[in-house]
Amino acid sequence: MAPAPKNNALPKPDEQTVDSILRPSGWDDYIGQDNVKRNLKIILDAARMRGEAVDHLLFYGQAGLGKTTLANLVAKEMNLPIRITTGPAIEKMGDLAAVLSNLEDKDILFIDEIHRLNKIVEEVLYPAMESRKLHIVIGKGAGARTISLDLPAFTLIGATTRMNLLSEPLRSRFGATFRLDYYNHPDIEAILARSAKILGVKATPGAIAVLARASRFTPRIANRLLKRARDYVEVHKLKEITEDVARKTLEVLEVDPLGLEVHDRMILETIIDKFGGGPVGVNTIAASLNEDRDVVENVYEPYLMKLGLIRRTSAGRVAEPLAFEHLKRPPTGEAGKPGKSLF
């Protein structure tokens, strides 16, 4: 039997590959976070001039704002290898010891979700970061002994969405800490325009504006919306992403023009429809969504507060006038006071 002909066509990149392609490959491609970039470049330039390892760095902020991208750019800027892992992947002291003992001089170790390191593992990091020592305990009980191994000068870059969960001893050992803020609309629009060009899809300025407004000020979400709009264009055999296509894409995804998704609207509806605008406790809100309190506080609420739709008080969560306006509800109580327009 004759062998089957080979398929020489290049495979279509999957979602993860596309995400990698869209990631900035240099400082000039990294749009936004100007203050962070400016201060970070000073640290890198100084380390390069002295011929030293870069000081330990900590990046924190909401998911999707570019912490991992920044870590990779630091490694690229310094022309150094980067080892990437996550807090949950380092379960035991032995796991961390294996990672640290394989580092070479000036290597960069990036730990994403560093707040999820357990405390025993975290304590092993203290002398490693401070004194370049790895203390390993051999044996148990009265016969246990500790040996110390010298480590090369390395750079630890930590990333977290939950700064409050990092212990003070760990936070204090980072030489510089950077907070990544939500992006502004012009930066998000620039990111979308760049991504559309890379993906080879045309998008009108109106479409870019619609997607940017619904992006939650977050590049990762902006690119996700753009990819879904591209899908819509390809399936319907259209030539470009228009403003109408962008709106239809949001409708399919159940994302409203402000970027609110189902759970965001449920939070507002709970506060307004069930509790007259609040105040209402976060546990009650979490129960109505069948979500953990931590998810409500750290995933949903930051964006709702960023938009000025809710506020936190000692008595609970209160809907702002803009929330009533957005849901087309008549304002009551505190929300009856004049507020700014959503647009």
Image (spheres, helix red, strand yellow):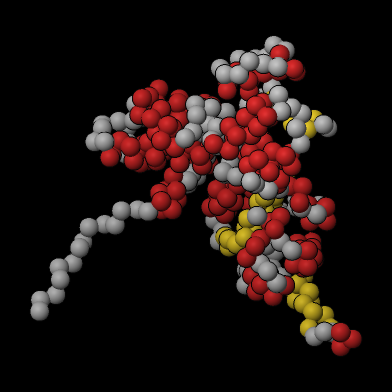
* Quarter occupied by the C terminus: top right
- Residue at (45% x, 50% y) in the render: 20
Query: Vertically, is 16 above or below 276?
Result: below
Toward which corner of the image does residue 316 lie, by quadrant? top right
- The location of residue 220, given as percent across then percent down, is 51, 42
Toward which corner of the image does residue 119 lie, by quadrant? bottom right
- Residue at (76% x, 53% y) in the render: 166
- The location of residue 245, given as percent across then percent down, is 35, 29
> Depth check: 306 or 256 in front?
256
- Residue at (71% x, 13% y) in the render: 336
> Depth check: 120 or 76 in front?
120
- Residue at (71% x, 61% y) in the render: 117
> Depth check: 226 or 68 in front?
226
* Quarter occupied by the N terminus: bottom left
- The location of residue 28, given as percent across then percent down, is 50, 38
Q: Is residue 185 left or right of residue 331?
A: left
